[in-house]
Amino acid sequence: MKVSSLKIKTLILAFIPLFACQDIFCQAVPGKDENIPYLVAFGQNGETSWGDDDFRSIFFFTVPRDYNRQFYIRVFDPDSGGENDEIQGIFDTRTLFSVYGGNGVDPEKHIESRGLNDGDNFKSGNLLASRVFGNEPTYDNKYYTFGPFNPSEGEFNEKWNSYIFKIVCEGISGDDGNLFRYFLSRDAGSDLPIEGANAFTYEYTFRMWNDTKSVAHIYPYVDTGIVSIKQKNFDWDDDGNILVVSTYKQGISVPISNEDDYAESTIPVEPQEIGKSLDFQFHKRQGLLVRNNNVVISLQNQRGDALQFFSSPIGGVPVYQPITRIRKIQK
Ligand SMILES: [Ca+2]
Ligand SMILES: [Ca+2]
Ligand SMILES: [Ca+2]
Ligand SMILES: [Ca+2]
């Protein structure tokens, strides 16, 4: 790459707004670039060895201040039964989905809203809508739509110039795995994204594809002041490798969990990685397929603060760029 074109690219990147929506699928959760088929929450009578350590899933949506129309949160396959879900015995799981707004939701102001520790009041905020789903063919392999909501029903976050909403999914009874997805939409009946909106979580519980080829990704954002990150993964079933890739890292392999256990490690962060996203890559084991692998991952910085994973990576998908080193060799 010529220096001039590199400079131009750097300039262009500098002017991409923090929450720029870079493709029309950016409000799907899981996001398009993540290549994750489903989120997962088991009923609370399930066993943690099936891959969910707390029987809940908490996601946040950001709606930009300049969007002044109503919107919807759509849940795909909210039921536990029929297609997509993980049966244990018979389908008897009941799952509660709840949408919150107002004061108490913003996880930067209200740490408990993240729901990372047992006993945290993760239901902080105003309850805007909720519904329990059991084994319901009406919503099997189909959407249920929450809303409409007004953006101002969220909690305003000055830094992101956005209103924050929260959706909590809890497996309130039964033992089956509920697999589902979200979409933040302008329309009740179809997936129409809101320009500049995004979604994030602090603890990601998800299902891997049932093949050995697909690589799943999550994209934590490295904010100013971060010098190292502690990763913690749960119940990875000894299923291949987890690699960390960035513009600076070609691929660091991290310790992996096996069955119903955690694996932790600390990854150094370089100054070049600040203000960008990291790419955690989940590569499945080759050979004998590990089926129905559900996994949990969470990250903390060196101060013990949880890092967010954005459904649409901020600054785009990071690609390893060995440019500087090649130049040095050429000199
Ligand atoms: Ca069951
Ligand atoms: Ca289903
Ligand atoms: Ca489901
Ligand atoms: Ca697992």
Image (cartoon, rainbow, N blue to C red):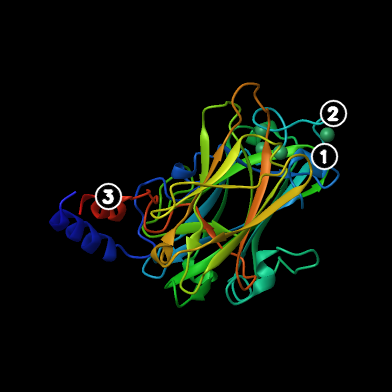
Indicate whether 286 appears above or below 177.
Answer: above
Q: Nearer the viewer, mark 3 or mark 1?
A: 3
Which mark identifies residue 175?
A: 1
Please name the amino acid that badge 2 sits on: Gly
State the separation of the CA atoms marked 2 and 1.
Answer: 9 Å
Which mark identifies residue 89?
A: 2
State the separation of the CA atoms marked 2 and 3.
Answer: 57 Å
Residue 297 in percent (x, y) is at 64, 51
Q: Secondary structure at mark 1?
A: loop
Write the residue at 69% across / 71% down: 112
Q: Is residue 86 visible to us here?
A: yes
Write the residue at 52% across / 69% down: 227
Write the residue at 70% across / 63% down: 116
For the residue carrying disc 2, how many other residues have a C-alpha within 10 Å: few (<14), some (14-19), or many (20+)? few
Question: Does any atom of ligand 1 lie closer than 8 Å to the CB of label 2?
Answer: yes
Which mark identifies residue 326?
A: 3
State the separation of the CA atoms marked 3 and 1.
Answer: 54 Å
Q: Mark 2 and 1 residues: CB-CB less than 8 Å, in contact?
A: yes
Question: Does any atom of ligand 1 lie closer than 8 Å to the CB of label 1?
Answer: yes
Q: Secondary structure at mark 2?
A: loop
Please name the amino acid that badge 3 sits on: Ile
Q: Secondary structure at mark 3?
A: helix
